Amino acid sequence: MTDFHTQTLAELSRGLENGDFTSLQLTEALLQRISAHNDKLNAFITITADEALAAAVRADAARAGGSAGVLNGLPIIHKDIFCTRGVKTSCGSKMLDNFISPYDATVVAKLQQAGAVVLGKANMDEFAMGSSNETSFYGAVKNPWDLECSPGGSSGGSSAAVAARFAPAATGTDTGGSIRQPAALTGTVGIKPTYGRVSRYGMIAFASSLDQAGVITRSAEDAACMLGVMAGFDERDSTSIDQPVPDYTAAIGKSIKGLRVGIVRQHFDVGLEAETGARVKDAIAMLESLGATTVEVDLPNLDLSVPAYYVVAPAECSSNLSRFDGVRFGHRAENAEDLLDLYCRSRGEGFGDEVKRRILTGAYVLSAGYYDAYYLKAQQVRQLIADDFKRAFADVDVIAGPTTPAPAFKLGDKFNDPITMYLNDVYTIGANLAGLPAMSVPCGFVKDLPVGLHLVGSHFSEATLLQCAHQYQQQTEFHQACPEDFQ
Amino acid sequence: MSLDKDQVQHIAMLARLKLSDEEYAENVKKLSKIVEFVDQLSSADTDGVVPMAHPLDAAQRLRPDAVTDINERDRFQENAPAVSDGLYLVPKVIE
Amino acid sequence: MSAGWEVVIGLEIHTQLATKSKIFSGASTAYGSEPNTQACLVDLGYPGVLPVLNKEVVRMATMFGLAVNATVARRSVFARKNYFYPDLPKGYQISQMELPIVEHGEMFITDADGNEKRIGITRAHLEEDAGKSIHEGLDASSGIDLNRAGTPLLEIVSEPDLRSAKEAVAYLRKIHTIVRYLGISDGNMQEGSFRCDANVSVRPMGQKELGTRAELKNLNSFRFIEKAINLEVERQIDLIEDGGTVAQETRLYDSDKHETRSMRSKEEANDYRYFPDPDLLPVEISDEFIAAARAALPELPAAKEQRFVSAYELRADDATILTASRALADYFETLVEATDAKPQIAANWVIGELSGALNKDNKDIGDSNISATDLAGLVNRIHDNTISGKIAKQVFEAMWNGKGSADEVIESQGLKQITDNSAIEAVVQKVIDENPSQVAEYRAGKDKLIGFFVGKVMQETRGQANPGQVNQVLKDLLKA
């Protein structure tokens, strides 16, 4: 048996193209690996072995017939927030434990058209609300680097699966850092593109003005390839942007000489764990050695981004999750006395604690008498934060800093204190509020746990971010390190 | 600002969430903390700042008026907990 | 109604827009299909789906705004109105709150004194309709049909400028006429395409502040609206005069029991938590878009009414009747075009015989058994003296019953008017010969007997003799 799991998407693609192996062989091998190791991680909610094998056979036939797509025969994993036709789509919730989607999300359809083989649906925080994967109805996911630690969240199943070499790529979604934070905590690459770059159709909504689909891989090169397929206008999503998708794969090869990198003064203030800060500074030094110049920039309202987010996101979520009422799909309470009882119990039973808390927060900040003080105020602060970024990007091409304040934390550590958990997203949330593209790249280890370098760009500058990350990865090997138990 | 149980009950009713006594106690505590945390926003000077509802400065795209969806009731109702003759069932609604 | 009280009414009219597909989805809006067969994933509020706005809806709202001299907003915003109800699949209704598409319009009605009165239109905004709950025949359950969910609505909100139930109905009729003229709604009240809620309050004559209002719902015919408002006004006045106070509440009109009753269940915890819908971007309307909508505006009822009076020399009240619907006005104009008779004659036929027949068969002008050109055929035969006006009514009846065109009926039933003078002379002579005593009396100066002779001649000719000629010939021959 070959070492399929150690290879990147790009390497596997070449192998398939050269006829070194078939998609069926590759798929079988990875499914075997998953069934051998997943119990340790709990990275999946659903493993779609039969569908994957059938897709692999189709991919091999397509290749033989000369009609192979970009991702033909390559195995990937979907976060269980993406609707997949005929397959359970739970969103990590009891509410949707019995839900079989009758349709495919646009992202799912695009990747399928490109020939990708879906191995399964990744575990996640319930309705993507969480930063540790502990809010999942299906239990927490464990970090392959330390099974007592969280892999981050909400795309924790995706990040753990890619870090454990179950697949070279997994889709994710990012509302406040849900791709980048788990990527940082598992030593993987995670990119959240510009709001509107990838269609949200079929992606179960958490906070509609913040949600964006992206991908977790091990290399920036693979992320470029995946994003190239996922991105693009969708007539079913009014907020998707009708702009041509650049050739990201072609863009990443260029040198970053002369790239202006912004360093945010506030990033290195209190709150950042010292060693994590040191790894990030090393990474920035590496970018300088590759010809980038650094400029200090100011994001004066950064500390307000977390409170603004924890008003806007719950407000939108409280409304988005109203459709789960036990009538047309999802969990329905038994023996309801009347309509009100049906609603209150179906929702009370179907949603977990964190989801309920956010729905309540959202209903509160929108309710009569509080709207102006909270919701409207947060939208104004959001504008201030977006303006801060705009000013900064007048002087720099990317902003570099830490993805998280510290490496992975122990499961259970922050679970009972929402504020401490929320503050984990302090570096990532700004990009969501402003709709900016951002990514995390592995930049070293602190006590054997990976940490990430966070890159943020101006709207639609994904190519620049990927280029910067790829050039950095040409000089570093952090992304090639493999957790000991998953060699 | 902190919340009391009455307020939590009121918003739980708005949100149609049945909570147990323990959940009420827990939420009074945690929601108060969250509200206190987001109260930081009041420190920001936002005079004259236009609230930002969307991250992108774009206008709504309009779809041509065409029927593109066909009847797929049976397929869509496979997920429905209770249907009869094509209708979704709920406990009797008294008007 | 008690003297000393002033009635204040504002109307909220929900008009379904006559699009092919729904406001935010590609499902059909056709009425009357099997339950839930026209509810796609977007209408059902499935997880992950998103709304995309129908362009035609925006165009229709723009046309309405232009037709009522309103401001059409260059930028309008959709918001979510959050509440739980089984016919509202997403748990929120997409509507417009702070920035509606149409604001500051007006409509003119004729008040009780016959004067023109301006009624302000506060706003008109776009929103999605809800589904329907079915309560019959399902034991302890209600059934939910979401075919109607997502049908586009234009909600037209008036200022509280209406001072009586009659004015409210007059205003409602004007709006009803306008939306049908514009072709933006079929206005079908039975099918619920045109619905109305009324905010009703009373205050002592001369008082400035408004009284507490009650919102009347479920007013689905012009007749009910007038009755329901009058009933509510009486209720409020009685209540206040008995020392009570009016509660701000929603009341349902029950046409069977002829009463309004409180809908407290819907009132509790009314906090809709409106906020801008993050799935939809602001709607921006360009000058070109508005110019195109303006160019597509048909001639509106008021202008058409004036033109009918000036160009066709119609009586003013006839012009009003004929312009009440665009279809009726078009029918009339087609008829006028195809006939040599005076337009007023044509108008008399449309308002008289034709409207009578339509009413009797409960039909709209669009379903008339006699087309405008066919009716012109009949009017022309009167004009050219082929038949008399009296015979024409007989011909009309035959045409209505599908016996063919005017000429065919006249021919097959031998109804052609007798204009041959010698033939008339022969009949007249016969009548004179058979009634010698009356002839003697007439000749002795009893002129009134002319009517007797005309009747006899008409009897002989089964009404087909030309009445003018009969008169002339009778006079000539009786003189002798």
Image (spheres, rainbow, N blue to C red):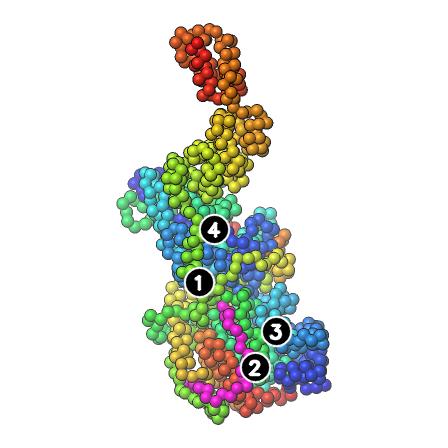
Instruction: Please give the range of residues in magenta.
Output: A239-268
Residue B30 located left or right of residue A158: left
Tell me the chain of label 1. Answer: C
Q: Residue at x 62, y 83 (%)?
A: A10
Tell me the chain of label 3. Answer: A
Q: Mark 4 highlights which residue?
A: C184
Q: Position of residue A406 (x, y in %)?
A: 49, 85
Near mark 3 (Cα within 10 A), the count class, few <14, some 14-19 or many ≥20, is: many
Labelled disc at residue C467: none
Q: Nearer the viewer, mark 3 or mark 2?
A: 2
Give the CA separation, mark 3 to mark 2: 16 Å
Q: Residue at x 56, y 51 (%)?
A: C30
Decide which of C48, A18 is in the foreground and name it.
A18
What amino acid does circle 4 point to? Ile
Q: Mark 1 highlights which residue?
A: C283
Residue C216 lies in the magenta-colored region:
no
| Element type where label 3 sits in the image | helix
Residue B11 seen: no
Q: Mark 2 highlights which residue?
A: A249
Q: Residue at x 46, y 87 (%)?
A: A259
